[in-house]
Image (spheres, rainbow, N blue to C red):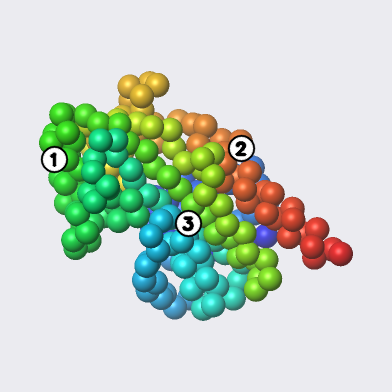
Amino acid sequence: MRLLYGTTNAGKLDSMKRRLRNIDVEVVGLNELNIEKISVEETGNNPLENAVIKAKAYYDKYRIPLFSCDTGLYIDGLEESRQPGVYVRRADGGIELDDEQMLEYYTNLAKELGGSVKAQYRNAICLIMDDNNIFKYDGEDIGLDKFIITDKPYPKMTKGFPLDSISIDIATGKYFIEMDDEVTDEESGEDGFARFIGRALQIYNQRCNK
């Protein structure tokens, strides 16, 4: 079965393909299909609301099985009004930042908070198979463990994932960018995204076979 992943971000697409490699699905991104791209305004207040908004917009346009994800970043000790949340690429609610600007902003924020600070990504996903089968989820098992944001950037940066250069895994002490080629729990067959999609497809198939 082919599933469209509603993203043009090559890094996110590759990561999701690794996560779902043990499920019998072919994951393709928006840039891999000869389809007209649409712009979706993400007006939700949290990752799940945005995931649903994007998935419904893409499904209304393309009418094929697909899913969309969204992420919110939450930083320990930062006042609520300054939390990035779903606006990770916007500095204090301002204009959208490119990779270099984003790296600079969060490096300075870490410096402001003492040089390093704990943070966490909270994720959400919405899978639409057809008009009557919509599955959504934002459980803790699809989020990441807490990690460190540091004011000392790694000398390299991955396009599309600038914060990996200032994010440090607490357990290993490695920058996220150093872990790209390793099989982590988040990208294993037991990954929360894989479990969610596997369960959703099972439910969908059972409904179709009734």
Looking at marks 1 and 3 on the same chain, the residue that comes earlier in the sequence is marked by 3
Circle 1 SS class: helix
Residue drawn where x is 51% and y is 40% of the image: 140
Quadrant including the N terminus: bottom right
Q: Position of residue 93 (x, y in %)?
A: 22, 59
**Hey, what amino acid is under mark 1?**
Asn
Left or right: residue 36 compared with residue 3: left
Residue drawn where x is 37% and y is 67% of the image: 43
Residue holding disc 2: 189
Residue 63 location, quadrant: bottom right
Q: Are marks 1 and 3 in contact (CB under 8 Å)?
A: no
Residue drawn where x is 58% and y is 60% of the image: 127
Q: Position of residue 9 (x, y in %)?
A: 38, 57
Q: Nearer the viewer, residue 203 or 21?
A: 203
Circle 2 SS class: loop
Q: Nearer the viewer, residue 132 or 60?
A: 132
Circle 3 SS class: helix
Nearer to us of marks 2 and 1 is 1
Mark on residue 2?
A: none
Residue holding disc 3: 48
Q: CA distance from mark 1 to mark 3?
A: 28 Å
- Classify 25 as above or below 167: below
Residue at the outermost right position: 210
**Hey, what amino acid is under mark 3?**
Leu
Mark on residue 108?
A: 1
Looking at marks 2 and 3 on the same chain, the residue that comes earlier in the sequence is marked by 3
Q: Position of residue 195 (x, y in %)?
A: 63, 44
